[in-house]
Amino acid sequence: MIYPVNEIFQTIQGEGWHTGVPAIFIRLQGCDVGCAWCDTRHTWAVNPDHRIEVTDLLQSAPATAWASMSPTHIVEVVRQPKWTAKWIVITGGEPAMHDLRPLCEALEQAGYQIQLETSGTYPVQVSAATWVTVSPKIGMRGGHVIQACALARADEIKHPVAREEHIAALEALLKQVSSKPRVCLQPISQKPAATALAMRVCIEKNWRFSAQMHKYLEIE
Ligand code: SF4
């Protein structure tokens, strides 16, 4: 299995249930979900003309560049001595467009715990031990629907909110889930009204508030 990798970097997880955990992010290229507020639009297209070598990707590469990497090659990169995090976040783009089981297996054999961040619009193909964060992207331009199997596999639902209708849409989704995933509300684009709404509903429902700490700290 070969994956189109947009970037690999170590930082602190800035959002969701594991906010604050040192983590290595593997960002895969490619997404056709089409969220209006997407802050990683550079990952949408897998343009063959923007394919580069891995060594160039790890230096400073254009935002839309990507490299083909095998699970073995990705493990070699994340094991570099200066990176100490044992928590790996596979994100995108939409990483669930790919069968991630070979990558999960290779990373777990190397001693890492994996988190997947997905929009819930594709079936999730990961290891049994992977922590799955579904951030449901409902009614986006790409025309995808939320997959019941992705919701059922979610350990955490991290929901972007700006208006009351987003809360109603989440509650409708939660009615479909027999498991009890943890719920985080995340204000869209740090707008004050969205933040106030998320805070109020989190307190009412005893859900967790996800502030996207990295955006306030202006770190990656
Ligand atoms: S699913 Fe993620 S990467 Fe894709 S458009 Fe939505 S926010 Fe952007």
Image (tube, helix red, strand yellow):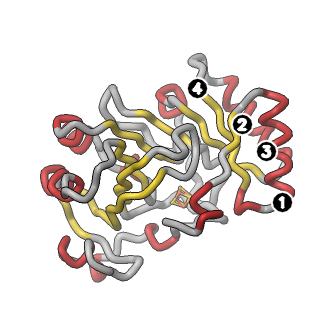
**Residue 183 placement, left or right of 100:** right
**Residue 77 placement, left or right of 137:** left
Quadrant position of residue 34: bottom right
In this view, the residue in front, 219 or 109, is 219
Q: Indicate the position of residue 32 as horizontal and vertical percent values.
A: 49, 60
- Mark 3 is on which residue type? Ala
Q: Nearer the viewer, mark 4 or mark 1?
A: 1
- Secondary structure beneath label 2: helix
Q: Give the CA distance from mark 2 to mark 3.
A: 12 Å
Q: Give the CA distance from mark 2 to mark 4.
A: 12 Å
Question: Where in the image, quadrant-wise, is ligand 1 located?
Answer: bottom right
Q: Is residue 1 something one can see in this rendering?
A: no
- Residue, disc 1: 192
In this view, the residue in front, 82 or 91, is 82
- Secondary structure beneath label 4: loop
Q: Which of marks 2 and 3 is in front?
A: 3
- Secondary structure beneath label 1: helix
**Residue 138 placement, left or right of 29:** right
Earlier sequence position, callout 2 versus callout 3: 2
Q: Indicate the position of residue 48 as horizontal and vertical percent values.
A: 28, 77
Q: Indicate the position of residue 215 as horizontal and vertical percent values.
A: 61, 63
Q: Give the CA distance from mark 1 to mark 2.
A: 20 Å
Residue 198 is labelled as 3
Marks 2 and 1: in contact by CB < 8 Å? no
The residue depicted at 32 percent of the width and 80 percent of the height is 60
Q: Which of marks 1 and 2 is in front?
A: 1
In this view, the residue in front, 208 or 5, is 208
- Mark 1 is on which residue type? Pro
- Mark 2 is on which residue type? Leu
Earlier sequence position, callout 4 versus callout 1: 4
